[in-house]
Image (spheres, rainbow, N blue to C red):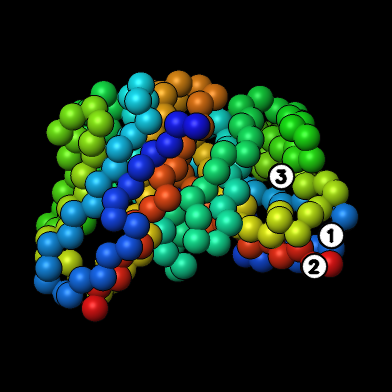
Amino acid sequence: GQNIDQPTEMTATEGAIVQINCTYQTSGFNGLFWYQQHAGEAPTFLSYNVLDGLEEKGRFSSFLSRSKGYSYLLLKELQMKDSASYLCAVRPEGDSSYKLIFGSGTRLLVRP
Amino acid sequence: DARVTQTPRHKVTEMGQEVTMRCQPILGHNTVFWYRQTMMQGLELLAYFRNRAPLDDSGMPKDRFSAEMPDATLATLKIQPSEPRDSAVYFCASGLAGPGYGYTFGSGTRLTVV
């Protein structure tokens, strides 16, 4: 089966750093994605990892360890606008389906 | 900016009525997904298409849900008859099949069945 776990909620302070973890157990692995979703809006693509290591993109970085079934999203210099849900998604199969299975998301609240 | 367009944005209907949701994927994208989002279940994959052909609809309740893609510019998700437990936000997403490609989501249809 497919299982993707994330913390339900996190709170952090403006200007700080926060790390959102994601663990997964899926039938095969073909990439891990992070999406951001503001309340009442559509998810938007943040990052993609398929090899082990850290991918940095501005204030956001994403890390993957395939052997541990583990990823994290690191947000630096937090801003109030970063308050949103962050969704971890795995492409579980090595075939051509390319579907994404999502975790339940982590609601991040950034306080002044 | 290319967008996935979904209509309607909001729909309130009575139990037992038919509901049709529409999605216009981004031109050139060959893969279209339908997801449903609720507070309890998060984002669930209902069905998806590749080059307009249905690849997997195992996430849908078959007795009441149907998904089609009559042409490259239109995907539809139909519920007949609708039930209160179908109340959710339904998202369409499109993209290119291939490693490294994420998908672009539409703004969703918020469905309320009373």
Q: Nearer the viewer, residue B67 or B63?
A: B67
The residue carrying pointer 3 sits among few (fewer than 14), some (14 to 19) or many (20 or more) residues within 10 Å by Cα, namely many
* Image coordinates for residue B99, horizontal then vertical, percent: 50, 22
Instruction: Say what amino acid the circle numbered 1 marks.
Output: Glu
User: What amino acid is found at the position of numbered circle 3 in the picture?
Assistant: Tyr
Q: Sort mark 2 into few (<14), some (14-19) or many (20+) by Cα contacts within 10 Å.
A: few
Q: Chain of mark 2?
A: A
Residues A32 and B16: in front is B16
Q: Residue at x 42, y 64 (%)?
A: B38
Q: Quadrant of residue A105?
A: bottom right
Dots 1 and 3 on the same chain: yes
Q: Which residue is mark 3?
A: A72
Chain identity of mark 3:
A
Picture coordinates of residue B22 (x, y %)?
Answer: 25, 47
Q: Residue at x 32, y 63 (%)?
A: B10
- Give the Cα separation between the discs numbered 1 and 3: 19 Å
> In the figure, residue B73 lies in which quadrant?
top left
Q: Quadrant of residue B37?
A: bottom left
Q: Which residue is mark 1?
A: A14
